[in-house]
Image: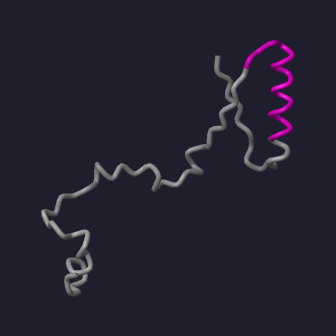
Amino acid sequence: MQLTINIPDNLSKEKISLLIKDIEEILIKEGINLEIKPKVSKEKTDPWDEIDFSEIAVDTGIEDFAENHDHYLYGTLKK
């Protein structure tokens, strides 16, 4: 069985810790094993962490693009 508890964001870390401890104690008294896994809501994650660059990569066919990207983007001298 899985139990999900949504805790408001405005609670302090100390209050959250106390609530979790209380829940643990209740379940232990009932003889229920538990494993707590915090789950961060999607809204708080950095969208850059979810980008799959292999899906958006483009093969330019330019062999030295990584080394000389300034040349190809801005016209500077090649290295």
Membership of 18 in magenta stretch: yes
| Residue displayed at 25% across by 83% down | 74
Q: Does residue 25 appear to the left or right of 56 in the view shown?
A: right
Q: Main secondary structure of the magenta part?
A: helix
36 versus 12 height, above or below: above
Q: Does residue 29 appear to the left or right of 61 in the view shown?
A: right
| Residue displayed at 80% across by 48% down | 13
Q: Does residue 64 appear to the left or right of 3 in the view shown?
A: left
Image quarter (top left, top right, bottom left or bottom right) of the C terminus: bottom left
Check the image and name the residue furthest to the top. Answer: 31
Q: Which residues are magenta?
A: 17-33
Image quarter (top left, top right, bottom left or bottom right) of the N terminus: top right
54 versus 65 height, above or below: above
Check the image and name the residue furthest to the left. Answer: 61
Comparing 63 with 23, the one in front is: 63
Q: Does residue 5 appear to the left or right of 15 in the view shown?
A: left
- Total residue callouts: 0
Membership of 62 in magenta stretch: no
Q: Residue 20: x and y, percent?
A: 80, 34
Q: Residue 49: x and y, percent?
A: 47, 52
| Residue displayed at 66% across by 33% down | 37
| Residue displayed at 71% across by 31% down | 5
Comparing 7 with 70, the one in front is: 70
Q: How is the image coloured?
A: one colour
Check the image and name the residue furthest to the front. Answer: 79
Q: Residue 63: x and y, percent?
A: 15, 66
Residue 60 sits in which quadrant? bottom left
